[in-house]
Image (cartoon, rainbow, N blue to C red):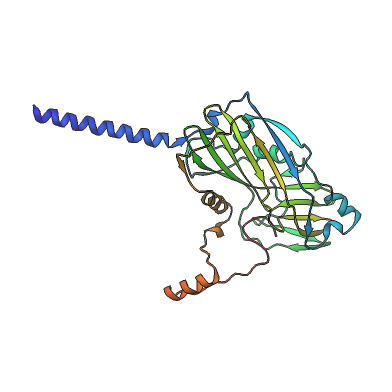
Amino acid sequence: MKRNWLITTVLMASIFGLCISILSCATNKINLRKTLDTKETLQVQAYWDPIADASLGLPDHSPKHTALFKNLSPVHISQAYEVDAFKAFFPKGSVPVGHVWDLDMDEVLPFLRQFHPGATAEMHINPGGEGSVEIFGRSISLVKVGLESEGAFACLRALSSTYAEVVFRIHAEFQLDEEARAYFTPAQFIGRLILNRNHGTIRDFWLYLPPRNTNVDINAFGGADMVYVPRMELIGQNINDQSDIVWETAITEAAAKSALKASFYKSAEIERHPVKEAVAKAQSENRPIHVLLTWGVFDDESC
């Protein structure tokens, strides 16, 4: 009898422990879309600086070029979004911290159209598939390598009992004029948003073009150039919800951005080292060194 009681006790303890384990695993995931309050809105401000520098001087090539590129500015400086619109950046199911998912560009593009109505997910020069490009009146066939870099991805970076932070990366461009074959192609858009899980509201929203040199490609009338735009961003903030956040589960921002980059480019998985470090590693491991010299970067949509 005593032995049966002991077995029953152990069995109950095991079942209880299993239930706790399952509950713990379940609480590590969250369905962000279900927490949104569809009645709330967020005011978003748009900023778009003029082109500050150009590698080849295309914006000043002719009055037609100047008209296309010199006066770019947001079509809506300020715009109110229903909170439900931000579900565009959330996964369709429950996910854990660190999980990456792809975004529906049909839901994302309305945000980019606050800059310009010509925002599109269809890149006119995309390194996946077959095609050609016309440069200064001459058609050049492109040797494609099958890497798809269009679209957008997001990652759940951090979670607390009150807040959730999502970071995202978008590849898109703006068709400025179809007849002139004029395009404005940002290297990438990076962004983040913080959701108040208790209220179902957006605390912070930030979408921006990283401000490094030659961060935009432009095309018009068969010509192309690499230019620098100091600032291009969307910012929305709930000023009544700015208390300090203590994240309970999180990955670093660098890790999240690395995961997003790897979702676009298979080459991002290649291990890279500074020259001195690579030489030392090659010598210690008796391995050859592969050197790749490029003009510009190859992990975004700039030239």
User: Which quadrant does the C terminus fall into?
Assistant: bottom right
x then y, percent, for residue 26: 40, 34
Across and down, in percent, residue 58 comes to 83, 59
Location of residue 122 in the rendering, given as x and y in whole percent from the top left corner: 70, 47
The N terminus: image quadrant: top left
Front residue of 194 and 84: 194
Relative horizontal placement of residue 256, taking residue 61 as reference (left or right):
left
Measuring 66% from the left and 57% from the top, which residue is drawn there? Answer: 127
State the residue in front, 207 or 155: 207
In the displayed structure, does residue 79 sit left or right of residue 90?
A: right
Measured from the top left, where is residue 89 in percent x and y?
Answer: 59, 38
Residue shown at 84%/47% (left/top)? 71
Answer with the quarter of the image where residue 291 lies: bottom right
Compared to residue 265, the image places residue 195 above or below, namely above
Name the residue at the left extreme: 1
Residue drawn at (61%, 25%) of the image? 38
Q: Is residue 190 above or below residue 83?
A: below
